[in-house]
Image: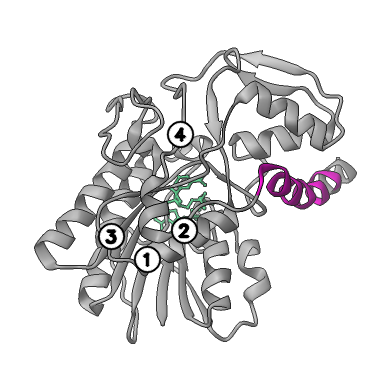
């Protein structure tokens, strides 16, 4: 198959490209490097089945030749990024998603949207199931991301209903792994960075808020299965193993043999109290569930970050 992947130079996009190439497919990779890095695709520079184009998908564009699947991953995803680029985030979820849907329609291709658990906002239902409509503040600082993704889901369903495009929607929960950016403000790189430097780990609030973390190869496997499926409504993809942020900080210290202490900072506005996916739907229709344990996933991620942290310590 020939696939178009937007956001290909990002964390998840680059891993998806690896998986698609490993499955024998050809990839047209698009990215404007707003939050992604060419380094994430550097290992594929000589890969003849990957064709990279620097493209902002909020602008009109075309892709030559046949396309079987359009996968739309482009969007700032970490709170630090979307708070820095709120307008770009709204643009890519709206105009960008529409351009990718138009491409799928023109090429009679399937379409995959990577949506987010942020569609549930600060959820009043726990664990979060796909039929829950969410509790989102539409005018808070995080609304640029949450509402952009909710719009993206709505326009995806509209293209399916109006034009018959074969669409899939993944609601991704916190995912981690190599190629995340050390300084992107997400909890896994932030804790690993602080622990590896021997600095105190920053915990927001009292640390009793919960999260669940999915290793990137598991997530990509879920995306791959979903894009080949006939499910049109959103499907949660994430790891249901839930823990408090405080517990998580302690695990990171143990794993990295760090004696870092913990400092507390005020909870950011609209920070969700609880996050845990109900993945029954993905299990039933995709036969999917995460396989990589938190210990193993964190070890692989810590190995990746270790070189970077040590490198930056040597420079400063
Ligand atoms: N990582 C997670 O835990 C998580 C959770 C939920 C949803 N998601 C979704 O998965 C997707 C990928 O997230 P990620 O963690 O890899 O983020 P990322 O920031 O690493 O990757 C996003 C990529 O999109 C690119 N991009 C942004 N705007 C663009 C535009 N206008 N045109 C072309 N490219 C553009 C960026 O340069 C970047 O390479 C996003 O849609 C995100 O919302 C991720």
Distance Cα–Cα, label 1 vs label 4: 30 Å
* Tag nearer the camera, 4 or 2: 2
**Position of the C terminus by quadrant:** top right
Residue 223 rendering spot, x and y as whole percentages: 44, 60
Residue 126 rendering spot, x and y as whole percentages: 39, 27
Q: Residue at x 55, y 70 (%)?
A: 19
* Tag nearer the camera, 1 or 4: 1
Q: Residue at x 35, y 41 (%)?
A: 87
Q: Which mark is residue 222?
A: 2
Q: Earlier in the sequence, mark 1 or mark 4?
A: 4
Q: Residue at x 52, y 65 (%)?
A: 16
Distance Cα–Cα, label 4 vs label 2: 28 Å
| Residue 304 magenta-highlighted | yes
For residue 33, say whether it is visible: no
The secondary structure type at the circle numbered 3 is loop
Q: Is residue 280 above or below residue 6?
A: above
**What's drawn in magenta, residue-wise?**
293-310
């Amino acid at each position: 198959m020939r696939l178009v992947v937007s956001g290909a130079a990002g964390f998840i996009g680059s891993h998806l490209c690896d998986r698609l190439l490993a499955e024998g497919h050809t990839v047209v990779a698009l990215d404007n490097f707003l939050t992604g890095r060419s380094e994430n695709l550097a290992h594929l520079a000589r890969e003849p089945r990957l064709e990279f184009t620097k493209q902002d998908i909020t602008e009109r564009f075309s892709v030559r030749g046949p396309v079987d699947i359009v996968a739309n991953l482009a969007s700032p995803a970490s709170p630090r990024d979307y708070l820095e680029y709120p307008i770009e985030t709204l643009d890519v979820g709206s105009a960008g998603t529409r351009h990718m849907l138009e491409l799928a329609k023109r090429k009679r291709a399937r379409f995959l949207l990577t949506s987010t658990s942020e569609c549930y906002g600060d959820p009043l239902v726990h664990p979060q199931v796909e039929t829950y409509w969410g509790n989102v503040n539409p005018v808070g600082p995080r609304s640029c991301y949450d509402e952009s993704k909710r719009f993206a889901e709505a326009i995806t369903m509209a293209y399916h209903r109006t034009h018959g495009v074969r669409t899939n929607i993944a609601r991704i929960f916190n995912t981690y792994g190599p190629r995340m950016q050390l300084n992107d403000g997400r909890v896994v790189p932030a804790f690993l960075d602080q622990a590896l430097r021997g600095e105190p780990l920053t915990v927001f609030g009292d640390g009793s808020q919960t999260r669940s973390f999915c290793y990137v190869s598991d997530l990509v496997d879920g995306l791959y299965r979903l894009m080949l499926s006939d499910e049109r409504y959103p499907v949660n993809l994430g790891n249901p193993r839930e823990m408090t942020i405080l517990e998580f900080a302690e695990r990171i210290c143990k794993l990295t043999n760090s004696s870092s202490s913990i400092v507390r900072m005020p909870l950011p506005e609209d920070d969700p109290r609880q996050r845990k996916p109900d993945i029954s739907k993905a299990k039933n229709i995709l036969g999917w569930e995460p396989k990589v344990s938190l210990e193993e996933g964190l070890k692989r991620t810590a190995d990746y970050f270790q070189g970077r942290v040590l490198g930056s310590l040597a420079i400063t």
